Image: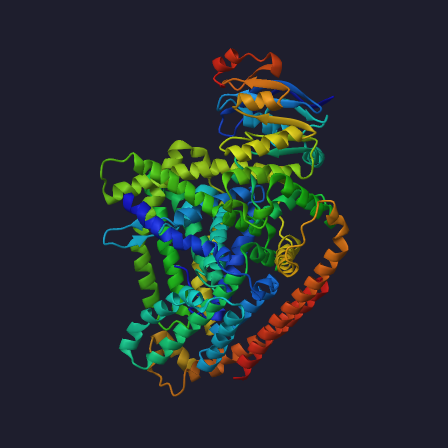
Amino acid sequence: MHELIEKTLKEASSFFQNFLIHEYSEKTSLHLVDPRLKLIGTFLLIILAISTFLVEKIIVLIASSLILVSFSKISLRKFISRTWLFPVFSFIIMIPLIIANLNNVTYSIIFALRVFTAISLIQLFIMTTKFNEIVFALQYFRVPKALTQMVWITYRYIILMFSEILRILLAREARRIKESSHIESIKKAGNSLGLFFIRTYERAERINLAIMARGEITFSKKTFLRFDAESNLKLESEVVDGGADEEADGVSKLKSPYKSERSKELEFTLKKLDKIYLIYIVVTILIWVMV
Amino acid sequence: MKVIEVKDVSYIYPDGSIGVKKASLDVYENERLAILGANGSGKSTLLMIMAGLLKPTRGEVRIFGLTPERKNLKIIRKKVGIVFQDPDDFLFNPTVRDELLHVPLQLEWSKEKIELRVSEISKLFGLDDILEKPPFRISGGEKKKVAIASVVITNPDILIIDEPTANIDGKSRREIIKIMKNYSGTLIFTTHELEIVKEIASRVVIMNLKKEVVLTSLVDTLREDFLKEMGII
Amino acid sequence: MHIPDGYLDMKIAILFFILSSIVIAISLKKIRNFNTPLIGTISAAIFAAQMLNWPIPGGTSAHFVGGAFAGIILGPYAGCLAMTAVLIIQSFVYGDGGLISLGANIWNMAVVNVFSGYLIYQVLRKYGEKLASFIAGWLGITLAGISAGIQLGVSVSFKYALPVAVLTMGFWHALLGIIEGLITSAVVSYISAHSPYMIKESVDKKVVIAIISLVILSPIFAYSSEMVNYSEPLENTAKVLGVAEMQKYTGIFPDYSIPGLGYIGTVSGIVGVLILLLIAKALSMRG
């Protein structure tokens, strides 16, 4: 069991870094593009990537996604560190084919490149889109609400559940003196998991009551994009005005015309970003078709 | 005026265990009611029943004269706000700001009103710095404050808080007590701390380990040796 | 077992997207009186349990998948939805498993694994909780692996022949499945001893049988969908005989890209632009 806990903890930190990638990556203009557009764009480009074996076409897509990476100020090193593993793995599993017939070298390389392209596109999407935006986009594209709610609840409670599992396992480990065999420790840890699931069931009931008390979770554009971008803008304006924005509570009402002008401006910027993204994707697709 | 009437209410959980046994009590407008009892005496269950969340297995509960039936729930939910003991059960939105907006958006408040109220509440609770953070990435004290803030934001007529100060550091504790003291509506809460009862409550209800309501009394006439005997302090 | 994008042919990916959607739709319909927070919370718990890194003799480690477990605890429908939620998060948060192949991954781990695990457990339950849940866990994951092997094997993009892919995936998962079975058995027996009301009793058999037969028929669908759009019958037979590699390549995959895939690719490119423009239009109208 000791080994189980150690190994799990070792992997968990990188896992959570993935989970919270938005807290680690800086906000860029690609973050502000409408998540629905980004989802569709990503989807289409992946479809293009996996429906060809022509190396030129794949290179077009790789170049396109790398240009987006550099424009969105994501560090290239971080990006590669998140994408290299699968393609390399894909090439390795093709080695027996290469040994059987050397002609398969080109196939294997292109196969790995296709995988790399698809993974890059997904990672680019993931690194610039928060999960609640993704859920919002899924809901917009008619994924049933019951399912999106479920997905959100799952996402929200993963970290809590993980720390609960760990607490239960550690509690058992803390009072373990005798060494046990592999099978034995799987059984014991399995029992701990059983306890964990029983507790989860009880918690689920309470969460259900909380949602009954407060109403369902809704995902609207209102609740994230605008506010997010607005606070970004506010930050900028504060830097410009030297933080002269500090005013008493009552004054905030008077400020509202200024604010609405601000948000109009913001809406305009957002629309412009959406348009630029759209044109970029269309151009990529057209080049892909023509090559 | 009675705002909540609980008459001979029993609640039995689906697994057969008893939640509350034959409880009767009334809650009056604008009073501050503390529910005391040892761990496992059914306080939380009673609160859920008083909020109209759990339907009593036997007996009757009336909230503003309404039974917790489907057709009345909308009014009850608007008038009664409940904060759960474990904020992790309670906070499920993407950011702290979304938590605060959760109910106001359902009430379809105007944009200006929402903005004004959010800034008021976040100042009152000191949440300005964590508004954009996900609620599962903040400290325990902050979680509790956010949970309370997300209910207080609409000023419900009745505010029910389960263990407002359990597992919380001194600063957050003082802030929460201050907010509860300043709350103008009816307040119902559970606690294990006698100081808080003396500071905030006007009346107490005591439950025993058989999940029964054994006593209601004014705070001034509360006897400490009785509380010790009950295992509450 | 998460299949990334690029391994499966488009046709296969789309086919399994459709099949999975059907099962998800049925499940959503069937669980109407079930509460979604419960399923969401349990799937968060399964997700967290998947993060545990079980050491196995020889220095490597294995992960619990929990498909059969979800079926046993939540019943097949809610279990299928819980696993679907897990898989959606894995592909949209970690990039584990692709977007286009998400349908196929849901099919393997949320349909095949959950429904077969559930059925095996229900059938064997009379021989004892422990045995039934062990076999459900072990066989459930093995069948899911075989299903993934079939999807990969029939795909032209993935060059290994069907028998190779199925045997490799099946064997590997049957081996790792032992751990899955042991964990499933320990968890289920603990729960059934301490809080038996959590374990879902049997549900409407007809629908389950219908879905299981869909599972059994799916390889045939997959195979026949590969047959469509094939211009060269000769190449076709060659593929069946496993001698497709005998052809000479002058350029880079001229055989595949020009008559078959390339054509589809160009069409999908044009369709893609159209869809994108339409959506942009719709979005700008909504503000």
Q: Which of A128 and C213 is in front in this view?
A: A128
Q: Where is residue C27 in the image (x, y as percent from the top left)?
A: 53, 50
Q: Which residue is drawn at 50% across and 41% down?
A: B139
Q: State how many labels appear.
A: 0
Q: Where is residue C87 in the image (x, y as percent from the top left)?
A: 47, 55
**The C terminus of chain C lies in which quarter of the figure?**
bottom right
Give the colouring mode of the picture: rainbow
Please indicate whether residue A274 sits to the left or right of residue C261 in the image.
right
Compared with residue A34, is residue A209 higher up or lower down, i.e. above or below?
above
Residue B37 in sight here: yes
Q: Position of residue A218 (x, y in %)?
A: 63, 49
Q: Which of A250 and C282 is in front in this view?
A: A250
Q: Position of residue B86 (x, y in %)?
A: 52, 35
**The N terminus of chain C lies in which quarter of the figure?**
bottom left
Compared with residue A238, is residue B165 higher up or lower down, i.e. above or below?
above
Q: Nearer the viewer, residue A248 or B166?
A: A248
* Residue situated furthest bottom in the rendering: C250
